[in-house]
Image (tube, rainbow, N blue to C red):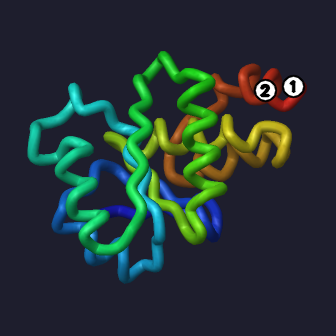
Amino acid sequence: MDIRPLTDVYAVSPQITPEDVAAIVAAGFTTVVCNRPDGEIPPDLQATEIRKSVEAAGLKFVDNPVIGGAITLDNISAQSRAMTESGGPVLAYCASGNRSSIVWALAHAGQRPTDELIAIPARYGYALEPFRPTIDQLAAG
């Protein structure tokens, strides 16, 4: 498992497995957000299976599937709610962590400078520059 912290309270990761949950708990996360649609992965890694392991460990699980190239305002709102309502650090995952970084950035549009929202995920190789106009548009309200 490769946890990539974007902030002190939000990190992203490539796909997790049920076996990763103990390490997620040990790292202090209180909420796990799945940004990966079930259609991309085998049944043993789909949201229902990960949810069972996460909730059995006492953590909150949020299923917010994000389709690459088709991120919706509902995705952004759901990610924002998950972060706001988590009560502690959030780990969001998808195939690589990229979509989880994108919805984080979009959810923070207007709360942080656009340059920062792009630069932070870039430390991990996530290229959010194409989302600059969307971030700026969301920031403008």
Q: Give percent across and percent down for residue 2.
A: 35, 62
Residue extending farthest top:
70
Which quarter of the rendering shows the C terminus?
top right
Local crowd at mark 1 within 10 Å, few (<14), some, or many (≥20)?
A: few
Q: Give percent across and percent down for residue 17.
A: 20, 57
- Give me the residue at 21% from left, 26% from top: 39
Which quarter of the rendering shows the N terminus?
bottom left
Residue tagged by mark 2?
138
Mark 1 lies on a secondary structure that is loop
- Give me the residue at 65% from left, 52% from top: 120
Q: Is residue 1 above or below residue 76?
A: below
Q: Is residue 13 above or below residue 43?
A: below
Q: Nearer the viewer, residue 67 or 75?
A: 75
Q: Is residue 115 above or below residue 135?
A: below
- Give me the residue at 49% from left, 17% from top: 70
118 vs 72, left or right, is: right
Residue extending farthest bottom:
26
Residue tagged by mark 1?
141
Local crowd at mark 2 within 10 Å, few (<14), some, or many (≥20)?
A: some
Q: CA distance from mark 2 to mark 1?
A: 5 Å
26 vs 129, left or right, is: left
Q: Nearer the viewer, residue 73 or 9?
A: 73
- Give me the residue at 81% from left, 21% from top: 137
97 vs 73, left or right, is: left
- Where residue 16 is drawn, which disc sits there? none
